[in-house]
Amino acid sequence: MSLSLRSQFLIPIVAMLLLVCLAVTGLSWRFASNTTRVATEARLRNLLQLCSVSKYPLTQPVLDQIGEFSRCKIKVVDQVAVTNRLFSSDQSDGTYDGLAIPLDRTEDPSGLQLSGLESGNFLLALSDPQERFERTTQAFWLPMATGILSTLACSAIALGIANRMVRRLEVLKTQVNRIAMGEYATVEVDPRARDAIASLTHSINSMSQQLEKAKEEIANSERSRLIHMLANGMAHQLRNSLAGAVLLLQTVIKRNPQNAPHEIQMGLQQIQLAEESIRRLLTISRHGRSGNDQALSVQQIHEQIDGYTRSSADHHCIDLKMVCSGEDLPRRITKGTSVISALLNLVLNAMEAASQQVTKAGDPNASQTQQGMVQCRYVWDSQCGLHRWSVRDNGPGPEASIKAKMFEPFVTSKPEGIGLGLPTTALLAKELGGDLQWHRDGQWTEFVFTIRDS
C-alpha cells in the first residue's frame, strides 16, 4: 500500500521524536535511580555513623525508636553481605535496601554505650525500597512529560509544515496532469517563496510555456502543409485558365498590331498581376524558394511594380509613389523576382486600404473622401547589409481583432480574402534572411520588408 506524501513526511519525523523521547526518558530514569540510590545510601550511612558515636546504649528498643524517627530499621547483627555500600537485604517481612558498617567496640569511659550493647559486630540500617522508587518516579515524570509534550508540539509543527508543502505539491501534481491533458496554463508562484518547490514550480511553468509554444509551432506546421497543398492545386488551375486568356489576347494583338485596343494591353497587365499571385502560391509550395529568380536592380523592381499597379492606382485615385535615392537605383538584388512578388502583395494591400480612407470635415453629417496615398521607399542599410523597403498607406489600418496574428495563415478581415498574402510575404522574407514587421504611425500603416544582401 502506497503512503501519501503527508504520511511519508510525518511518519519518520514522529518516529524519530518518539525514539528521542524514549531515549531521554530512559536516561532520565537511570539518572534518577542512581541519584536516589546515592541519596538513600548517604542518608543511611549518616544515620549509622550518628548511632555509632552516640553516648546512649545501643539496645534494640533504642534502635527501634531511632528508626521510627528516620523511617527505617536499625539492627546490630553478627554477619552481613557487604559493608559501607547499599545492598538488597532479604528479611522475613520483605526485601529492604540495607547498609552496614562495622561496629567499633572500643572501651567507652562512661560505660553507657557498652553496657547496653546488643550482641553483634555490625550496625545495619534497613530502608523500604518503595520510598526510593517513589522518589525515582517523581524525578522521572518531569523529563518524560517534557519529552511527550515536546513530541506533540514538534509533531503539530511538522504536520503544519507537511500540510503546507503537500498542498503546494498537490497544486503541481494537478498542473502536471493538466499538461498531460494538453492544458498549458501556468501556476501562480508566491514572489516571496525561495525554496525548492518554488524553483520546481518555475520549471514546470517554463515547461508548460515551451510545450504550448511547441504546440503552436506544430499547428502552424500543419497549417503550412495544408497551405502548400492548396497552393499547388490553385496554382495549376489558375495557370491553365490564364494561359488560355493570354493566348487569346496575344492572338488578337497579332492580327491587328497597329490598331490593338488599349484595353487589351490593360487586360494583359491584369493577367500579369494574376500570374504574380500564382507565383506567390508556388513560392509557398516550394517553402519560399522560387525556381526562376532573376537578379534585378532596385530601379527595375520599382518600375515593374509601378507598371503592374499604376493603372489600378489611377482608377482608384490613389497617389502611388516609388521612392529611392539615385545612388541606390542601380543596386542589384539577387532574388529580384521574389522581391517583386512580395512587394507587389504589400503595395496592393496598401492600395486597397488607402482606397477606404474617409475623413469627416465641416458638417458632422457630411463626409468627403480624402485621396489615398501609398509610398514604397527603398533604403540600403550598409551597416547590417540589409535591403529594406517601407510600404506605407494612409488607410484606416488593420482591424483590432487581427492585429496580433496578421502573419498567420487564413487570418483576414476581407470577406473575399483567404489570408495567404502576408504569411507568404513573411515566409519569403525569412527565406531571404530578413523579416517582415508592421506598425501604426499616426495616420499611417507601415510594413517594413527586409532581406539580407546575398
Image (spheres, rainbow, N blue to C red):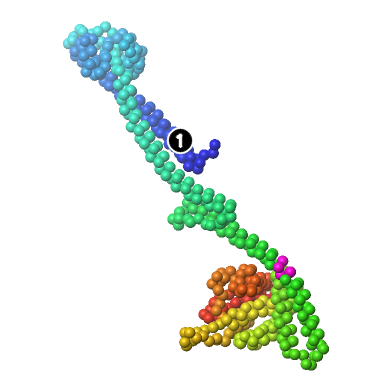
The rendered magenta stretch, by its main secondary structure, is classed as: helix
Q: Where's residue 278, x and y in %? A: 72, 75
Look at 23% across and 16% down and name the residue there: 68
Q: Amino acid at mark 1?
A: Ala
Task: Tell me: 201 left or right of 322.
Answer: left
Compared with 82, 220 (above or below) is below
Quadrant occupied by the N terminus: top right
Sort mark 1 into few (<14), some (14-19) or many (20+) by Cα contacts within 10 Å. Answer: few
Q: Where's residue 205, x and y in %? A: 53, 56
Task: Tell me: 350 left or right of 194.
Answer: right
Q: Nearer the viewer, residue 163 or 378?
A: 163
Which residues are drawn in magenta?
229-233
Question: Helix, strand or loop at disc 1?
Answer: helix
Look at 48% across and 38% down and name the residue there: 12
Compared with 449, 191 (above or below) is above
Given the current orientation, which residue lies at the most extreme left position?
110
Look at 21% across and 10% down and name the residue there: 61
- Judge whether residue 388 can be spotted in this image: no
Quadrant occupied by the C terminus: bottom right
Task: Tell me: 94 left or right of 279.
Answer: left
